[in-house]
Image (tube, grey):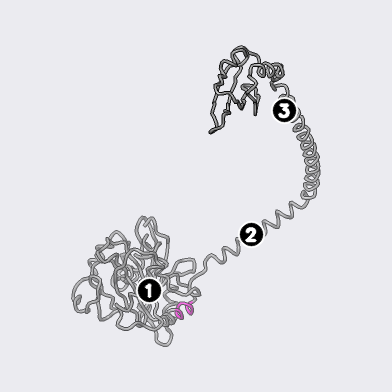
């Protein structure tokens, strides 16, 4: 009950003979029947009974209203289905209807409620009430002519669970009773106090008035609908139960939204009016600050350009300062190297770096001993040598790598 969406609501159940209504309040974890009324229908003026019941219950459009009853050629049945979303379940039930109806009504509409009972091998139980669309016209006429709006139309048995006791609603289905999920002839409950089991079940659920005018059985349909309307299960099942057209449902928030919008507009106008005086001064100050900011940005960009130019010059100076002076006696060392080589050796390629001297030489000598030739060069030592002869040619190619001797200045 603490999860109920309604603090107060009304249920009006109609039949061919009379209209009965109840006003309920949710209090202390239970549903209290605050008021009840009934009125016999007149053939010439059926709306009078509806109006009388609404007056007796002090109806206002701020109170949620549930209409209940049996529609012309409406059929109630129970089936099973897997747990589905309301939209998907409606599509599945559209295919299920022909298997439960002897003849599907023209322009058939239906409401359904999938229950949270333990799942059976066939799925979860689903209560379905199918009816022709035009059968709602009489109910719609009674609602509109009585000056009311209804939140929902609920068939009384929509909230019946598989474990519930048998029940009999003679004002809706005079020839049948509902036992264990199926319709049976009414004679099976004749002479039995079927309502005693329901009184016991609802002992803590409802707070009924101790009034001699109140009788449990005549208002049993209203109690069934109230039990569903105040349940937590109803909050997630509205999409499957809502069958009333939009023009019959109340728009309680329309006036409140209109007043809210009007007040918001007044606040906006007041705020705009009070801000006009300061707006000009604020705009001038903004422009002055903006102009000053632009001037400062220009100065900052100029300073950044100068700074980048200075940084580039500084990097160039640092690169020049950090450069190695290189070899001071290149020509002398090359002369010594040339004197050490015999006349039959020719240097094809030479690459001089700070850490080494790479040479590619060609020699026509058969036995060229490079190690012995380089012993006289004290400032170099042999780092790597590769010597190969080319086919039948008598010449050989020598790839030589010289590295500075230890302690030698490069």
Q: Residues within 10 Å of mark 3 (few under 14, many from 20)?
A: few
Q: Is residue 330 above or below residue 23?
A: above
Q: Report, in whole angstroms, how far the alpha carbon at label 2 lies from the one at label 1.
A: 39 Å
Mark yes or no: residue 38 visible: no
> In the displayed image of the protein, which residue is found farthest to the bottom?
44
Q: Quadrant of residue 94?
A: bottom left
The disc at residue 68 is 1
* Nearer to us: label 1 or label 3: 3
Q: Give the residue at x 77% y 32%.
A: 309
Q: Secondary structure at mark 1?
A: strand
Q: Is residue 13 magenta?
A: no
Task: Identify the main secondary structure in magenta.
Answer: helix
Q: Which residue corresponds to mark 3? A: 315
Q: Position of residue 254 (x, y in %)?
A: 56, 66
Residue receiving disc 2:
263
Tags 2 and 1 touching, CB below 8 Å:
no
């Amino acid at each position: 009950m603490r999860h109920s969406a309604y603090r107060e609501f009304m249920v009006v159940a109609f039949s061919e003979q009379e209209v009965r209504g109840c006003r309920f309040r949710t209090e202390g974890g239970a549903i209290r029947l605050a008021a009840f009324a009934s009125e016999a229908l007149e053939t010439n003026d059926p709306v009078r009974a509806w109006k009388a019941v609404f007056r007796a219950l002090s109806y206002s459009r701020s109170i949620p209203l549930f209409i209940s009853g049996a529609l012309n050629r409406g059929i109630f049945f129970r089936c099973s289905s897997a747990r589905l979303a309301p939209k998907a379940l409606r599509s599945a039930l559209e295919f299920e209807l022909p298997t439960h109806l002897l003849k599907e009504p023209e322009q058939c509409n239906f409401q359904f409620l999938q229950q949270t009972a333990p799942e059976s091998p066939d799925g979860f139980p689903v209560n379905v009430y199918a009816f022709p669309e035009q059968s709602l016209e009489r109910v719609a006429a009674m609602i509109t002519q009585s000056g009311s709006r209804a939140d929902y139309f609920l068939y009384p048995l929509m909230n019946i669970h598989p474990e519930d006791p048998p029940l009999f609603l003679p004002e809706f289905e005079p020839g049948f009773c509902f036992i264990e999920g199926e319709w049976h002839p009414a004679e099976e409950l004749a002479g039995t106090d079927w309502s005693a089991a329901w009184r016991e079940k609802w002992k803590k659920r409802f707070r009924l008035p101790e009034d001699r005018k109140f009788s449990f059985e005549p208002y049993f349909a209203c109690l069934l609908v109230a039990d569903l309307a105040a349940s937590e299960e109803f909050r997630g099942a509205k999409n499957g139960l809502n069958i009333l057209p939009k023009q019959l449902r109340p728009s309680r928030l329309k006036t409140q939204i209109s007043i809210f919008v009007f007040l918001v507009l007044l606040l906006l106008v007041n705020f705009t009016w009070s801000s006009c005086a300061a707006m000009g001064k604020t705009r001038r100050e903004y422009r002055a600050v903006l102009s000053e900011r632009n001037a400062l940005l220009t100065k900052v960009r100029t300073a950044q350009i100068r700074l980048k130019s200075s940084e580039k010059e500084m990097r160039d100076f640092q690169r020049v300062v950090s450069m190695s002076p290189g070899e001071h006696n290149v020509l002398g060392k090359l002369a010594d190297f040339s004197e050490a080589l015999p006349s039959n050796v020719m240097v094809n390629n030479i690459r001089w770096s700070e850490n080494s001297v790479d040479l590619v030489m060609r020699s026509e000598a058969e036995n060229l001993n490079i190690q012995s030739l380089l012993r006289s060069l004290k400032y170099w030592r042999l780092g790597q040598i590769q010597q190969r002869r080319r086919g039948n040619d008598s010449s050989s190619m020598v790839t030589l790598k010289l590295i500075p001797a230890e302690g030698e200045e490069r």
